[in-house]
DNA sequence: CAACATATAATGTTATAACATATATTTACG
DNA sequence: CGTAAATATATGTTATAACATTATATGTTG
C-alpha cells in the first residue's frame, strides 16, 4: 500500500524524503514480523543475527569483536548478548590461549539445531515479500547498495 | 557499497533474503545518522517524529491515540513520549472537555521553532542519499510500497 | 625492561522499549 | 437507570540499548 496512505500523510517533499521514511517504516514492518516469529524460540532478532554469524564460522570460534563488526546493528552490546545466549545453552565461550584478552565463542549443537528449525523462516520470508518479483528485489538491493556509497 | 562486502558475507540465498538484510542494515545506517544529528537538539528520532505529526495538525490538537496510529514505529509508548516532550516545553497537554478520557496535545511555539531549525536536516538528508537519483529513489519507493501489500 | 599506549572484553549506570495492568470515562444494553 | 463492555490514557515492571568506565592482557618504544 502506498506509504502516504498507511501513515496518513498527504505527500512528501520529494522522493528522497519519502525514501527515508519508507525505509524506517518498512524496517518496522519487517522487524515486527521477525520479533513475532522469533518469540516462539525465545530469541531476539539480534540474538538470531549472532547465531547466524556463529554458524558461518562453525566449528571455528569467533571473538566478541568479530561479532560486533559483522552485526547489522553496530551499536549493540555484543558481550552481554553472547552471555544471554550462553545462559540459554546456545553458545560456548572460553578464553583464547594465545591472546588471553579474547573470548572464543562457538555455537553449540543446540544452537545449530534451533537455527535449522528457523531456516523455515526464510521460506516464510519469501512468502511475506512475495508481492514483488525476484527482479524487483534485485533492483532495490542494487539501488540501496549504491545509495550507501 | 555492496552489502555482501560491508557485512563480510559471501553471498545470500536469494534476492529476497538479501533484501530483508539490506533493509535492516540500511535502516541502521540511516538511523545512526539521524540519532547523531538530533542529538544536538536533545531529541530522539521518535520524539522528532511526534513533533512533525503535531506540526501537521497545528494549531489543532492531536490525541495520544492519533499519534500512536501515525507513528512510524507502532509499538511505542506514545503517552510517555509526549510526557518527555512536555517536560522539555515542546508540547502542551490538556484534557479534552468533550471526552475527558482524551488528552489534547499541541506543539508549542518553542517546538515549532526547533522543527524549523531541523528542516535543514532534509537538505542534509538529500546530500546523504545523493548517491542515487530522484528516479531511483522513486523506483525503490514504488517497490517497497508494493512489497508491503 | 619499564612505562606508556593500545586492544579486548566485561561491567556500571541511566534511559527507554516492550509488555502487562490499572484508572477513569464513555457507550451500550437489558 | 444500573451494570457491563469498550475506549483512552497512564502507570508498573522487566529487559535491553546506549554510553561510559573499568579490568586485564598485549604491544611499543626509549
Image (cartoon, coloured by chain):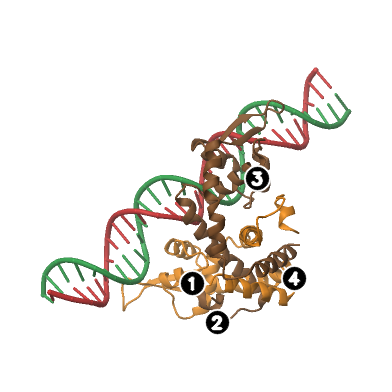
Chain colours: A brown, B orange, C red, D green
The chain ID associated with circle 4 is B
Cβ–Cβ below 8 Å for labels 1 and 2? no
The CA distance from mark 1 to mark 2 is: 12 Å
C19, A31: nearer the viewer: A31
Circles 3 and 4 on the same subunit? no
- Residue A62 vs B11, above or below: the answer is above
Residue B132 has which mark?
A: 4
Percent position of residue D28, x then y: 83, 32
Q: Earlier in the sequence, mark 3 or mark 2?
A: 2
> In this image, D30 relative to A52: left or right?
right
Please state the total of marks drawn on the protein image. Answer: 4
Percent position of residue A142, x then y: 72, 65
- Residue A81 vs B143, above or below: the answer is above
Say which element carries label 1: helix
Quarter of the figure with the N terminus of chain B: bottom right
Residue at position x 58%, y 81% in the image? A11
The CA distance from mark 1 to mark 4 is: 28 Å
Residue at position x 67%, y 55% in the image? B12
Residue at position x 56%, y 48% in the image? A48
Crowding near the residue tagged with mark 1, few <14, some 14–19, many ≥20 C-alpha atoms within 10 Å? some
The CA distance from mark 2 to mark 4 is: 24 Å
Determine the image quadrant of residue A125.
bottom right
Circles 2 and 4 on the same subunit? no
Mark 1 or 4: the one toward you: 4
Instruction: Name the residue carrying label 1.
Output: B70
The CA distance from mark 3 to mark 2 is: 40 Å
- Residue C18 vs A21, above or below: the answer is above
Instruction: Name the residue carrying label 3.
Output: A68
The answer to whether residue B148 of the structure is visible from this angle is yes
Instruction: Name the residue carrying label 2.
Output: A10
Say which element carries label 3: helix
Cβ–Cβ below 8 Å for labels 3 and 2? no
Amino acid at each position: 500500500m502506498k506509504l502516504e496512505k498507511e501513515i496518513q500523510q498527504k505527500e512528501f517533499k520529494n522522493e528522497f524524503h519519502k525514501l527515508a521514511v519508507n525505509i524506517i517504516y518498512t524496517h518496522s514492518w519487517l522487524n515486527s514480523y521477525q520479533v513475532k516469529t522469533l518469540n516462539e524460540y525465545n530469541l531476539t532478532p539480534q540474538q538470531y543475527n549472532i547465531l547466524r554469524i556463529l554458524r558461518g564460522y562453525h566449528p571455528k570460534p569467533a571473538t566478541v569483536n568479530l561479532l560486533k563488526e559483522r552485526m547489522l546493528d553496530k551499536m549493540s552490546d555484543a558481550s552481554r548478548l553472547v552471555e544471554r545466549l550462553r545462559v540459554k545453552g546456545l553458545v560456548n565461550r572460553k578464553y583464547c590461549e594465545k591472546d588471553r584478552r579474547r573470548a572464543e565463542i562457538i555455537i553449540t549443537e543446540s544452537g545449530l539445531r534451533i537455527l535449522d528449525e528457523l531456516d523455515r523462516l526464510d521460506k516464510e520470508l519469501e512468502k511475506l515479500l512475495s508481492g514483488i518479483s525476484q527482479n524487483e528485489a534485485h533492483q532495490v538491493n542494487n539501488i540501496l547498495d549504491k545509495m550507501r556509497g
